[in-house]
Amino acid sequence: MLPPINEKIIIPEGVKVELAGSLLKAKGPKGENEKSFHHPKIDIALQGGKEITVACNKPTKREKTAIYSLIAHMKNVLEGVKSGFVYKVKACSSHFPMSITVEKDEVVIKNFLGEKIPRKSKIMPGVKVKVDGSIITVEGVDKEKTSATAARIEQATRITHRDRRVFQDGCFLIEKSGKHVE
């Protein structure tokens, strides 16, 4: 048995937080986000609108990992409404010039490897996608939806049954939330 765990998350300035049961709602300069955090043995409380406490009186290893996972997700919600998340994807084509456009809730990739049928990737709700030349910028306040949209764009141009050393065309993630990916 581990000692009781009582962790605090400080709410950044300019962010308003509401806690209704296990539903955390946050509003900030970049937008609004909400996420449900439910665990039967973990208590979540809002302390005066300035900090969130996450506690467990008799934790096991499983509850300890759940607590720190919940804290990481809560910090992502707070960071998202404060500054947002930006992912950048680069379109690389050496054999055939491909064109990328955004149509309603889809990213359409035309002429990928000379294919006649365009490849499409869904944009998740609440996420904005901009195409500027060969750079695709994916922005949003929800980290999970933003990263999933960027991953879907990358997966749409996945090549199978060809030599990756020769066929290096595709869309590749180059930047995640301000961190350069190599």
Image: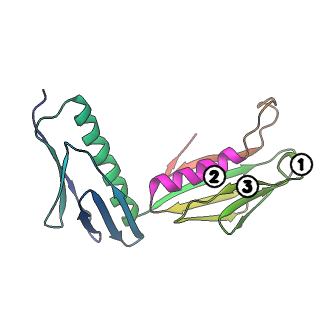
Residue 178 visible in the shown view:
no
Q: Position of residue 127 (x, y in %)?
A: 54, 63
**Nearest-to-viewer mark from 1 and 3:** 3
Looking at this view, name the residue that lies furthest to the top: 1
Q: Position of residue 109 (x, y in %)?
A: 77, 56
Residue 57 is marked as none
Quadrant that contains the C terminus: top right
Q: Where 95 sits versus 48, above or below?
A: above
Which of 128/96 is in front? 128
Proximity of marks 2 and 3: CB atoms separated by less than 8 Å:
no
Which of 173/54 is in front? 54
Q: Main secondary structure of the magenta part?
A: helix
Asked if residue 146 lies in the magenta stretch, the reply is: yes
Pointer 2 or 3: first along the chain: 2
Q: Position of residue 115 (x, y in %)?
A: 88, 48
The residue to which callout 3 is attached is: 120
**Nearest-to-viewer mark from 2 and 3:** 3
Disc 2 element: strand
Q: For the point 10% across and 40% down, which residue is it?
A: 57
Pointer 1 or 3: first along the chain: 1
Amino acid identity at mark 1:
Gly
The residue to which callout 2 is attached is: 89
Residue 114 is marked as 1
Magenta residues, start to end: 141-156
